[in-house]
Amino acid sequence: MKQPQTTLAESVTQHIACRILHGDLIPGLALPGENELATEYSVSRTSIRNALQFLAAKGLISIQAKKRTTINKREQWNLLDADVLGWLAKGKVDQQLVEQLMVTRLIFEPNIATLAALNATGHDLAAMEDALQLMRQGQHTAQADTFEQGDLAFHHALLRATHNPFLQSLGNALSSAMALSFQQTLEEDVRQTRDAVDEHSLLLEAVRLKQPERARQQMRTILLNAARKHIWQDQPELLNLIV
């Protein structure tokens, strides 16, 4: 199926967003006016206005009548928005943000695994098995895209297996956050991910046997092992407080 073309407003939105998210445009900075931006990007003022309104909806900028549009602080960014996470993935992600993302995953995902072990159906287990098979395929054939697809599918199937409507409503945001995290922790040579595949297999077994505490600990192990390899050489004391 033919992919829809990116509009001019979407191209401007993405370019400005990436400059904000990757530190080229710092918080508190005032953006040029609409006329200046329209000239800079060779688009209409309408395209600029649409782009700015979209960025404001994501918390990246503040628009005030008769005042310059300004860049917001990181605390105001909607970091669980799929578009924002997608823009972040287009460049090098600030190390502090990578660490905070891993802390967020450590808060949510072990408990998601616990609920999955209590509530998973045969259909859920089959979905996890299919995802694990994709991970194995990617690992054996050194196809990073296939491995990442399987990894994301596994965690998404685990989330669905909680059968918790509130958690499932967070599914898209959590999935986008996990995808960004995977990009920061995936081995350069995907053939070296065999340990990760084995760890996910142990998690699947804990869910299959309805062992919630074992599932929780196994998910924590998966996350901490990835973090030790790619984020923290020495585990911060904070992580010992997250249970």
Image (spheres, grey):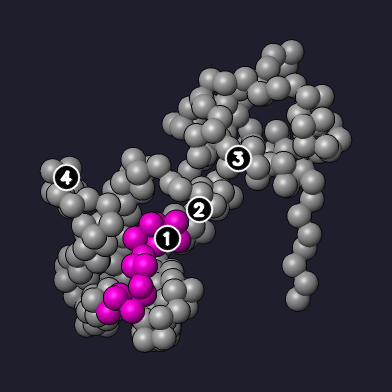
Q: Work out whether 196 lies above or below 176.
A: below
User: Label for residue 148?
Assistant: none
In the picture, measured across the screen, residue 173 lies left or right of residue 106, that is right
Which residue type carries mark 4?
Pro
Rendered-image quadrant of the N terminus: bottom right
Disc 3: which residue: 17
- Local crowd at mark 4 within 10 Å, few (<14), some, or many (≥20)? few
Q: CA distance from mark 2 to mark 3?
A: 12 Å
Q: Nearer the viewer, mark 1 or mark 4?
A: 1
Q: CA distance from mark 3 to mark 4?
A: 31 Å
Is the C-beta separation of discs 3 and 4 under 8 Å?
A: no
Question: Which of the 4 image quadrants contains residue 210?
Answer: bottom left
Report if residue 169 is visible in the image.
no
Q: CA distance from mark 2 to mark 4?
A: 25 Å
Disc 4: which residue: 236
Disc 1: which residue: 183
Q: Is residue 83 magenta?
A: no
